Each structure stands twice: as structure tokens, then as C-alpha cells.
Amino acid sequence: MAAAAMRSFSVVGLGIHRFLGLTGRCLDVECITSIRRCSNTSYTTYNDVDPAPLFFEGEVQVVLQRVTGMDIDRIFRRRQQEKKSTPPKYQFLTNEEVDEYMSEAREKAESLLQMPPVLKERQPINTILETNTSLQAHHTDKYVFADITFGVSDRNRTILVRETDGTLRSAWWEERDRINQTYNPRPGRNVVMPKLFNEENLKSALGRQEYEFVLDRVCAQCEPDSSVYQRVCVCVYDALDTHHHHNTLYSTRHYGPMCFYLAWNKRIDSLLVSLIQEEKINTASDIVYLYQLIHKDCKSAKLNIEHTQHVEFIKGYIEEDCLQRAQVQLALQCYQDLQHQRQQHQHTVTNAHGL
């Protein structure tokens, strides 16, 4: 520490096991364990492969933004907020002014639809710097040494912990998150992990279909590469997929990451059925295209079919890669029959009017 004389360090000796809520290896053990139990029932993440390079690939981003859509009414719908909402204002506008306001609304909508990054789960920190037995049992509390120099990012901030047995080590991620929040508080983030993320409360929230609320809350509370963030997201995505509630995230910033997760894990069949039943055949074709971008060696990617030929493109996926072939094929057949009936009806109406 003497070598860092030009830097500002803060020493916290407040009984870190109480201040950080630490019991053994992690903070709020009951919460973390509950989240693991919740997600382990169908927990599949990215299999130790970093998904970030593929997620940020240009064509993948274009497809994800396209499938997310931009429903202005849905993006700016009324939400539950702690702050009292201001009453709406009514104005008489010219056509030019309406176009200007709509352009501003679209720009704001694009910022609200910015997707959280999909990253690989961060690796645990187990760096031991020193073991000084002469300090063993000298104190009953642990000490935290935090670099609070202005301009240092929370990610790169030096934070060390002196254990009661004399071990000096780098702070674990859970400790870093709490110390960073103490010195550099971020809006919407708590020092203590919210109880929403324990098993009982999380299942209750998902049972009420509060999917977007849970995802917004975990985005505010956790870093996108933290284990808590990724496990909560998996719980939500699995619940959405199981109950066919994919549409509840449509035109939100979470729809793209959900589609990416399902495509990565080869679980797009249920999503395809939902989209085809909603007659979003273009979006369904884009989901298959996303699947092929992620799994470049899949059989359907080798077929010479353009993804703009929506029905044929989906049929190629059904024949080669689909795991729930009967369900997706039935949904697509119903869609085609409905389109055929509409064409016949339109033809009948046209003939009746002598057109």
C-alpha cells in the first residue's frame, strides 16, 4: 500500500462479515442458493463459451433489433412507478410539428430498446496476496482496503480484504459490488441484494407474469456478467418459454436477449409456434435466420433458401433441425390455410362487386 502513495485508499473496519452480509463465500447466501435452485431445474447457459462476440456481430444485432419491433404505444405505455406521474398535456399542432414530435419519440424509443449485453459469466476471484500468521486472531473483524481515487472505474478499482487469520486477498465479486455501491452509488441499485431474487419471491413474481419488472430490476441491480443476473434471466426466459408468454416482452429491451438465449440453446420451436399463431411470419423467419447465424453448421443453413421466402425458409428448418416438428408444422399449416381462405374470400368479394 505504501507504493500507492499518490492514490486515495479507504479502510473499512466495520465488521465486514456484518456489513457485507457475508457468510463463507457469498453475500446473502439464502438468496443466492435460492436462485440456483430455481434455475437448476432447466438451467442451461452458454456452456463456458463467450457469447459476446457473436451477440455483438453486426448481422445478429440487425436481426435482434428487427424481431424486437418498435410498437410506440407499447414502449410508452403507463407503468407502475414510485414517482407520481405528471398529467398529460394536450396541444394543437401542425402536421410538421406532429412529424417532429414523432421523430423525437422514435429516437427515445430506440434508446429505451437498447438491449442489455449478453456476456459470459465472470470467473470467481481467488487471488491471495499474502498470508501473515502474526496477524491471526488480532482482530475479530475483517478489513477492506478500497482505492477511491477519482476517475478509476468500478471494474478496475483495487479492493482488498484482510481476513481475521491474516490472509490478504483480492475482494470477491460480491464484496466488490457492495463496496462500489457504497462509494459510488448507482440509481436503482441496493447495497443488499433484493429479496425479489430468492426462490419463493421470484417464483411468485413469475407466476404473476411480472417478467419485464423482474428483468428490469436485475438489470439495475447486477452487472450483466454476474452469476445472479444470468441465473435470474434464465429463470425468466424458461418461464416465458414454458408458458408461451414470449409476446409479453415484445417491443422491450429484453426481447432480443431472450431470442438469442433460446436460439443459442436450440429452443426456438415454442417461440416459432407463438409467432406463427400471431401471424408474425416475417419475425418467425428472422428467428430461424438467427438460429442459423448462431449455429452455422446446422443442416437447414446448408439449404439454398433465402430467408425472405418466409414460409419455405421455415419449412426448411422444420424438415432439418426442428425438435418439435409436429407442433411447428401444424401451426404453419394452419397459417397457410388461413391465408388461403382469406384469398378465396377476397376473390369472392371482388367477383361479387364485378371488379
Image (cartoon, rainbow, N blue to C red):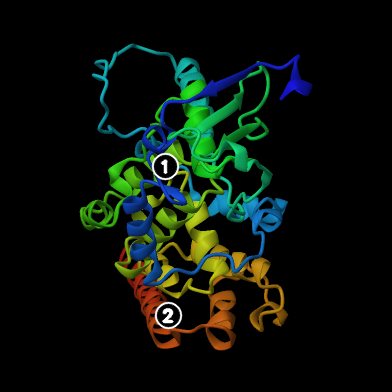
Seen at 35% across and 74% down, the residue is 338
Q: Nearest the camera: 26 or 72?
A: 26
Seen at 43% across and 35% down, the residue is 140
Residue 152 appears at what percent x and percent y? 68, 23
- The residue positioned farthest toward the right in the image shown: 3
Q: Is residue 132 above or below residue 201?
A: above
Query: Which residue in the structure is indicated by mark 2?
Result: 328
Query: Which residue in the structure is indicated by mark 1?
Result: 71
**The N terminus: image quadrant:** top right
With 25 as the anchor, is 89 left or right in this view? left
Q: Nearest the camera: 172 or 244?
A: 172
Seen at 47% across and 20% down, the residue is 101
Seen at 71% across and 53% down, the residue is 57
**The C terminus: image quadrant:** bottom left
- The residue positioned farthest toward the front in the image shown: 134
Q: Nearest the camera: 275 or 312?
A: 275
Q: Secondary structure at mark 2?
A: helix
